[in-house]
Amino acid sequence: MTTAPALRIIGLRKTVHVGFRRRAVEILKGVDFQVAPGAVFGLLGPNGAGKTTTVKVALGLMRPTSGSVDLGVEGLAHVGYLPENPYFYDYLSGREFLGFCARLFTLDADVRQARVEGLLGDVGLEAAADTHLRKYSKGMLQRIGIAQALVNDPELVLLDEPMTGLDPVGRVEVKRIIESLHERGKTVLFNSHILSDVHELCSRIAIMREGRVVWQGTVPEALADSPTLEDFFMKVVTA
Amino acid sequence: MNQLFAIAVNTFKETIRDRILAVIVVFALLMIVAGLWLGSISLGEQGRMMKDFGLVAVTAFGLIVAVFVAAGLVHKEVEKRTVYVLFSKPVSRVAFISGKFVGLCATMAVVLAGMGLFLFALVWVVDGQPSGTVLLAVVMVYVQLLAIMAVTIFFSTLGSAILASVLGICVFVAGQLSQNVLALTRLGKNPVTEALSWVIYVIVPNLSAVDVKAGVVGEQTLAWGQIGLWTAYLLAYVVVVLALAALVFRRKEF
Amino acid sequence: MFRRAVAVVVVLACAAGVVAYQATRPGRAAADPHVFVPSPKFFLDFSPSFRTSIADAYYLNMVQYYGEHLKSGRLESMPAMADLVTALSPHFIRPYSFGAFALTDAGRPDLSVNLLEKGFAANPDDYAFPAYLGYFSYQYGTGSKQENDAAGSRWYQRAAAIPGSPAYLLRLAAVLAGKGGEEEKAIVMWGQVYAGGDKYSRQKAVDGLDRILPKDKAARMKAVAPLQSTMSEKDFEALIAELFQGYGQ
């Protein structure tokens, strides 16, 4: 018996209307892919390919013009999301912010408390827990962002450029977090431009270009075609 | 409910820590004290001048704070993209709008309580006796501002923060002239303009139906039944406007 | 270094210019006794609290205007100001009294009376209005002195009838009634003062009656006889004792 995918996107189209004259711009032109439960899935593509828009539609932040999105997990209560270049409430401390995020789920107070303290430890921010977010460095903001994405112990985690702004130590820590999520059977989808990280972490990838998925498969399948993942990526997006 | 409360507390923390708020409140307190000076040139009417101009200052500055903070509440979340953090979680748009409003209500309560108690103390010193009606007037200003905050939040879901704040102030002024709009409906010979005037009259909150300030300075007798009914009307108005705001916000994409 | 010196010199020159400009402005022109006062009709459609705030602002304006123009006696805009303030805030008492006296200074005691009558119509429970009207009647009335005194007495009597009014109003009414040729009325009023008053008022009542009653004992007795039905027996006997002290049996 095959298990249902954690995320299935079928024929997704998205048109937005921009400017004073409401000019129609088609951002997604029929995106199809699915993510198996427990997989670490990489969504790649050049800037403007539609990766972030795809994730936003999957989360309900945008409505599809046509097509469907099927979240295999039971709703947003089981999803975690880290946006690209995250901005959070800078007047809150790290602990207050995670506490606020935890309150948005139906968790008991003691579970919330334990989760917040645990996550602060996991992302290495115990020392800065009571500092206001406005004083956090970019790397610290990225880490608190990952922590807020995990506060509800989600089944599906969507990370948009999770390595941005991190120093090598930070990147290792985030990779460790993604690996541990995978070991716990969580499904992870992340966008990234750092192909070495994709190579290291992902079991399956999809490459988008101009609003479509132009290739999807496993990393070994990609490497069978080209010596490195970068070469394969360039070949696909410039074809 | 948990979500509404969490968003409300977060909004309260956001708005109450805003330094602009403190500046406006200090300025309002200075205006109230200026009422003392006006009283000194009033030939013995210090008490009345203090109450009248003090309440004008409380209303004016309360309005500025209410409108400008309310206009920025939703807009800031969208602009700073903290909406991604919120709506990637199972947070309803209704809980968001309601939570924002409740948080702002708490902030405004603190601001108006501060200004109101200061005015109450000044009036006590000047008049030699406490005036409970001054506090009642401040409470009624607060109720009026609830309606204006709701309207401003509604406008902010439609357009920019600046437009929302300008429209919020316009609605406040229109609300003070509500009776004039009603008179207009009865003057028109054209049934279309009459109907339109009637629609505007219903849509604009009636902020002048009961005048507690006039009662405070002795120009009108305060009728508790009327005050109660007016308060209930404004609270119902708030519920309707927030529902409309939530409806508009549900269609919004980020 | 040179550029900095030039910048400093320029800024200092500008600062000197600012000070010099202000210092050389001509003095304030003599205030115009004719000021624009909007009609109350303009504001009557606005909300009551807006009206009271406008009234208060114009009241303060009225006080300043009076102070500025009192010496010159040019108070042409005072009637309009008083009319505006009292129209917008009819229960604001002070503008009526202040306005009435200011209008008298402006040479228009007739307008003072109109203003006070307007105030009394809006505030019928305030004894101050008929009391002021009593004063203006006997002080600035247009009839003969006797007529003015009689008119004043009638106003004071109305004032005295309002609950909470001070005792001296009835005494004033009685005095003016006597001077106004209405001795019978005056006698009755003095009787009321005696009956309702303390030791001081009673003394005043006796003095007042003594001034207007005939010296002849029989005529005096006849004149005070009507008081018997308006006072208690105890008060009447006490009053008679004082009025006829020294008259023998």
Image: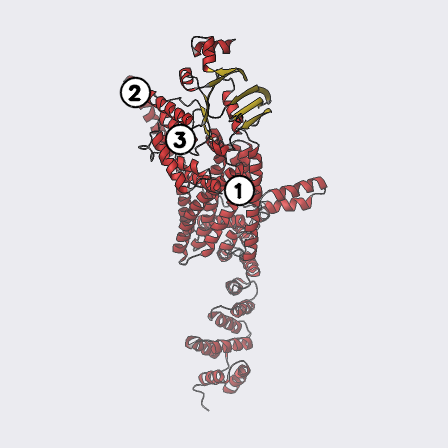
Depicted C23 relative to depicted C96: above or below: above
Q: Residue at x 42, y 10 (%)?
A: A228
The chosen color scheme is secondary structure
Q: Can you tell which mark lies on residue B148? A: 1
Tell me which amino acid carries mark 1: Ile
Q: Which mark is residue B16?
A: none
> How packed is label 2: few (under 14 Cα within 10 Å), some, or many (20 or more)?
few
Judging from the image, mark 3 belongs to the subunit labelled A
Q: How many marks?
A: 3
Q: CB of mark 2 within 8 Å of CB of mark 1? A: no
**Relative to A101, is C138 above or below?**
below
Q: Are marks 3 and 1 on the same chain?
A: no
Residue labelled with disc 2? C4
Q: Residue at x 32, y 33 (%)?
A: A126
Amino acid residing under circle 3 = Ala
Would you name the residue on which mark 3 appears?
A147
